Image: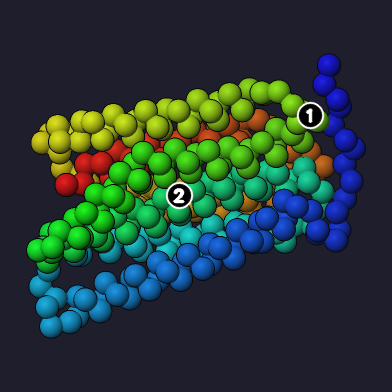
Amino acid sequence: MTTPPAPCVPNPSGLSALRDAAGFYSQLSGVLAGFAFAGLVALIAARIGARSSYGDLAVAYRPTVSAFVCLVAASMSFALAAGDPTSLGRASSLETAAGLGFAAAVLTLLYSLLVLLHAVERDVPDETGQTRSAFSLLQRAFVILVCPLTVLVFSAGMHDHIRLRTGTTTGLQGLDVASLAAVGAVLVVGLLARRFATRMRERRPAAPDRLPALAMAMALVAVGVSTVVVIAADPCRPSPDLLPATELALVAIFAAAAAVTAARLD
């Protein structure tokens, strides 16, 4: 028999742990956006320089721009969560909504770095092999570790929602099982993508421009959902399980797509 949820207590001081964490995430998103902007400036400088005839380097534009947009959107989502002076019910819904955009932003930022290293190696081959080695290391880490870990981190945010919905911190709930299954599925997809990367490249080359478009769509959806939650959601009750479950599915699908796309880079 589970303990009933605690009664809703307004939090006008805005000092809840969830809201503090949202503020820190908002700052982190802003800092990472600065790195993405610096990378964009470096790309532009390379293109207008004396040796600006490189064609592959231009492929890195779209992922870098997408990462910048996603990080700005994620910062806005977490700012909405940090600035909501209500009880924890609505804060948990804002946490998962903002986590959707943040997951897309982080994966896109690392993917843009991967694409940039790939483009530099193709345009200006490194005779020492260090650039290729760095690319291979980052590619393996991104496909096998970063993508499933991103889903796992998002699942940790979902646990706050589960705790507030059920009033208990013990035992695996339905969303917990779904989260673990999503992490495992993304890991399996990454391992299979690494295993059959060569065969996938032969059938169809990687399309680095599709993933950034999907990431921007997810980040903007996260901002929209956060805004709707602030305006219309009950401050005393978390959202229905369908909302975080849908967000979990989107994060898992995007992480799997990122793993497959990154593995197909040669």
Residue at image location 51% in from the left, 51% down from the top: 101
Given contact means CB atoms under 8 Å apart, are the residues at marks 1 and 2 in contact? no
Task: Tell me: residue 62, above or below residue 190.
Answer: below
Say which residue label 2 marks.
Answer: 104
- The residue carrying mark 1 is 168
The picture places residue 230, in percent across and down from the top left corner, at: 70, 52
Foreground: 83 or 18? Answer: 18
Residue type at tag 2? Ala
Q: In the image shown, does 114 or 229 lie closer to the viewer?
A: 114
Q: Which quarter shows the N terminus?
A: top right
Residue 80 in view, yes or no: no
Q: Amino acid at mark 1?
A: Thr
Picture layout, residue 4 above or below residue 9: above
**Image location (x, y in percent) of residue 40:** 33, 71
Snapshot colouring: rainbow
Characterize the local packing of mark 1: few (<14), some (14-19) or many (20 or more) Cα atoms within 10 angstroms: some
Q: Secondary structure at mark 1?
A: loop
Q: CA distance from mark 1 to mark 2?
A: 30 Å
Which callout, 1 or 2, points to the residue nearer the camera? 1
Image location (x, y in percent) of residue 194: 26, 35
